[in-house]
Amino acid sequence: MATKPGQLKAGDTVGIVTLGSPLGASVINEGIQTLRNMGFNVILGDYVYSSNGFLAATAQQRASDLMKMFAKKEVKWILPTRGGVGVSDILPFLDFSLIARNPKIVSGYSDITVLQNVLFEYAYLISFQSLLLLDFNTRTPAYNFNQFFAATSTVTAPWGIYNPPEIPLVSKVPGNVTGPIVGGNLTSFIGTLGTSFEINTAGKIIVLEETHEPVNTVYRYLQHLFLAKKFDDCIGIIMGDCTKCEAAYGKTYDDIINEFLVPLGKPLMTNLATAHGTYKATVPIGATLNLNTYNNTLTVMEPVVSP
């Protein structure tokens, strides 16, 4: 059974870190103030505001900030400012035994999902494909906050992952499977294939999403996962948003799903509101999920936080 972080409660302390690319100070400050207005205490890593081109700081510095947050007893939730690029750089510098002994809520999406899957693989820690600090503003839909806080503050199960009412889940290949859910951002996972940190899909349900890539590039990445046998040993597939993914050569994102993924014959659900999209369902990476494409449901079968 996976390790569950502690339940999030009013007044808890949030540790802010920048683990990949830098984020502007005004966006960081807006997010911090929003969290404080919600009643959270906020502490900052040493390199939250740092910037060195497309990376916030060195890999060792960014990893050090993360490890300090895991080591601080008062921190209940580790919230990265953004993803971007470079999160995989920090992985060799993490102490997974310390992380396993000090489970925290870790949320995020984009490049942060590389870290989240490694946390499950090496520390068996459940984390959350969900909010980043940059989402803490008045423009973020209430659905996104409701999804995250419901998942991280509730110790009951089972519970469902639902889209907003106006956005239907779409089942493409029939099936009913149960297993740990892994995945996140497609581009980010391609960069880890062939390393000790590549995504482990054996016996698992994989969720994928993408942003700002033409669909021929999405096809290339899916084909790379296929050649790496990541679709051979998974038990089910969930496809999330492909945000601002332009059609190419007359093919759309739906065409790629229908022509490439459907023939694989694995239970397949599409159109999950995820990550880079306006609406962000909270997906607990590492938790046991039931994917039922006969009745079009996604059900988390266990509590994902502990009392």
Image (spheres, grey):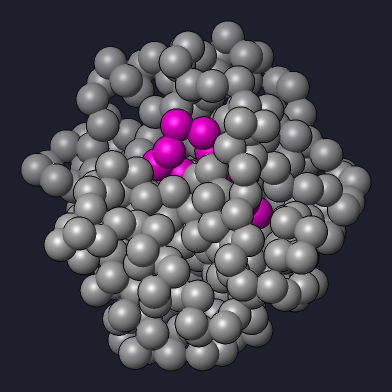
Q: Main SS of the magenta segment? A: loop
Q: Nearer the viewer, residue 43 or 167?
A: 167
Q: Tell me the quarter of the image containing the N terminus.
A: bottom right
Answer yes or no: is residue 57 visible.
Answer: no
Q: Nearer the viewer, residue 248 or 200?
A: 248
Image vertical order of residue 52 relative to residue 284, above or below: above
Judge left or right: residue 125 versus residue 118: right
Q: Position of residue 116 (x, y in %)?
A: 51, 59
Judge left or right: residue 236 versus residue 222: right
Q: Tell me the quarter of the image containing the C terminus.
A: top right
Looking at the rendering, the stretch of residues picked out in magenta corresponds to 275-284
Q: Which residue appears farthest toward the front when viewing the image? A: 250
Q: Position of residue 241 (x, y in %)?
A: 44, 48
**Residue that appears at 75% across and 34% down:** 150
Answer yes or no: is residue 157 visible.
Answer: yes
Image vertical order of residue 235 relative to residue 269, above or below: below
Q: Position of residue 206 (x, y in %)?
A: 55, 69
Q: Nearer the viewer, residue 140 or 18?
A: 140
195 in magenta: no
Judge left or right: residue 250 versus residue 270: left
Instruction: Answer with the quarter of the image where residue 257 lies.
Output: bottom left
**Residue that appears at 62% across and 72% down:** 173
* Count of numbered circles in the view: 0
Judge left or right: residue 10 versus residue 245: right
Q: Position of residue 306 (x, y in %)?
A: 82, 49
Image vertical order of residue 194 relative to residue 56, above or below: below
Instruction: Answer with the quarter of the image where residue 301 lies.
Output: bottom right
**Residue that appears at 83% across and 39% down:** 154
**Residue that appears at 86% across and 45% down:** 155
